[in-house]
Image (cartoon, rainbow, N blue to C red):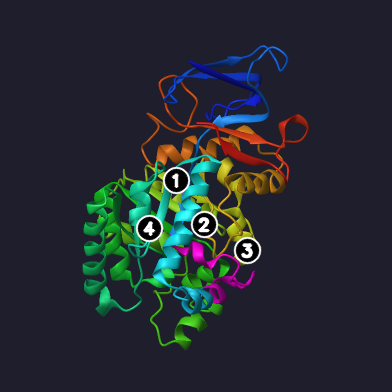
């Protein structure tokens, strides 16, 4: 048995921290117990800082790691898409894989125990298969033209077969309303729902909402300027459109785990509509990415008032400076000072594990679990995170 203690211990359930808390665990990391310790002078291994369970990064694009530092900030979604189209293949496959492998190792060392990751190709499959970090891979598809739907789906199903040869949990998933024909949204969603899990970029930008509600704006102009089809104008928030597309292929209620990612423009009307039909939705937020692209944050107050299951992700290095879960938590702490740190930690740990159906082993420091144990150092007064706070995996 081993024992470690710290100024503050958060168990991941959202409760108040244990001051001078300890965790006892087996050699393999299985938690035995937690409690209030003897203090810094009496504990043989006492850390200044915070102890918590391993993180669950609920939204990442590992295969875009080679794009770090190459994108302009505050471009809006239209400008971001232009940069992706220009820079996505600006280096060799070997370099892409090397960058992804380096960041996968960094994620593990920083304390990420599991991740919901997006893949558009097979660049990261071998990396994931060799990592101790668990990943569920969402094979994201695009295609604005209805006539291309069958070919796109045939291609992604082949990619899913390849992923399975690496022992990876993977299935197709739709990207977003503005990059897909209605037919492709439903076809990809059907495959994802059949696997039990679906991830979808939802209400990420005002440009997306304007496109769906009125058919106007920068995103609409971008697509029409490239002679690409745009989704139908509905006069309603894009999440309502997406929900209707799901109902084309699945009778309600939708019991599967559906991850709605970003939610910058989420409204009461849209979430009320989704909750009529979705019984297990999770709501991923990626604050630093949202600030990078749109200089905006999701309506955390609205989400909390409605009791939504919020999870935390980093998005990719095309729209972020690092894949640092502590930096994401610090951003939220500073932007929403009324949200207790324990609640933010729950978003970054237990709720993500819940989405992945991994709460039997991950997400909280409870006896019998092996979530990983993480130490956050360089904290401020009262246990608050600072700009200098960093995380390190203990086990």
- Whether residue 219 appears in this view of the structure is yes
Q: Nearer the viewer, residue 263 or 138?
A: 138
Q: Residue at x 67, y 49 (%)?
A: 331
Residue at image position (49%, 73%) is: 84
Q: Which residue is mark 4?
A: 124
Question: Which residue in the structure is indicated by mark 2?
Answer: 315
Q: Which picture quadrant has residue 51?
A: top right
Q: CA distance from mark 4 to mark 1?
A: 25 Å
Q: How far apart, in angstroms, are the residues tagged by discs 4 and 3? A: 24 Å
Q: Which mark is residue 282?
A: 1
Q: What element does badge 3 sit on?
A: helix
Disc nearer the start of the sequence (1/2) = 1
Looking at the image, is mark 1 or mark 2 nearer the viewer? 2
Counting other residues with Cα less than 10 Å from the Cα at mark 1, is it few (<14), some (14-19), or many (20 or more)? many
Q: Can you say whether 4 is above or below 156 in the image? A: above
Q: Is residue 367 magenta?
A: no
Q: Secondary structure at mark 1?
A: strand
336 sits left or right of 160 in the view? right
Residue under pointer 3? 292
Magenta residues? 63-80
């Amino acid at each position: 048995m081993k024992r470690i203690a710290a100024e503050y211990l958060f168990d991941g359930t959202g409760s108040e921290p244990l001051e001078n808390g300890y965790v006892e665990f087996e050699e393999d990391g299985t938690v035995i117990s937690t409690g209030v310790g003897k203090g810094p002078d009496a504990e043989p291994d006492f850390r200044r800082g915070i102890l918590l369970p391993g993180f669950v990064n609920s939204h990442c694009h590992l295969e875009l790691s080679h794009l770090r530092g190459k994108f302009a900030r505050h471009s809006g979604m239209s400008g971001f898409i232009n940069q992706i189209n220009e820079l996505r293949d600006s280096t060799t496959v070997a370099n892409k894989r090397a960058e992804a492998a380096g960041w996968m190792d960094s994620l593990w060392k920083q304390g990420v125990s599991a991740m919901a990751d997006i893949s558009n190709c097979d660049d990261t499959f071998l990396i994931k298969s060799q990592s101790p970090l668990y990943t569920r891979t969402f094979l994201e598809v695009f295609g604005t033209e209805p006539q291309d739907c069958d070919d796109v789906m045939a291609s992604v199903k082949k990619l899913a077969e390849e992923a399975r040869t690496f022992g990876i949990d993977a299935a197709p998933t739709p990207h977003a309303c503005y990059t897909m024909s209605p037919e492709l949204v439903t076809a990809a969603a059907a495959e994802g729902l059949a696997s039990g899990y679906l991830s979808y970029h939802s209400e990420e930008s005002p440009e997306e909402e304007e496109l769906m509600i009125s058919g106007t704006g920068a995103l609409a102009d971008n697509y029409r300027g490239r002679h690409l089809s745009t989704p139908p104008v509905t006069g309603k928030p894009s999440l309502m459109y997406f929900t209707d597309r799901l109902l084309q292929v699945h009778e309600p209620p939708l019991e599967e785990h559906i991850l709605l990612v970003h939610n910058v423009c989420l409204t009461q009307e849209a979430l009320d509509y989704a909750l009529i039909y979705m019984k297990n939705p999770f709501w991923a937020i990626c604050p630093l990415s949202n600030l990078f692209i749109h200089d905006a944050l999701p309506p955390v107050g609205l989400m909390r008032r409605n009791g939504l299951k919020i999870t935390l992700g980093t998005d990719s290095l095309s729209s972020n400076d690092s894949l640092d879960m502590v930096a994401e938590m610090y951003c939220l702490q500073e932007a929403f000072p009324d949200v207790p740190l324990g609640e933010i930690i729950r978003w970054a740990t237990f709720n993500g594990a819940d989405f992945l159906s991994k709460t039997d082993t991950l997400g909280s420091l409870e006896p019998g679990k092996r979530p990983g144990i993480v130490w956050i150092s360089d904290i401020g007064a009262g246990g608050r995170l600072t700009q200098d706070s960093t995380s390190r995996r203990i086990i």
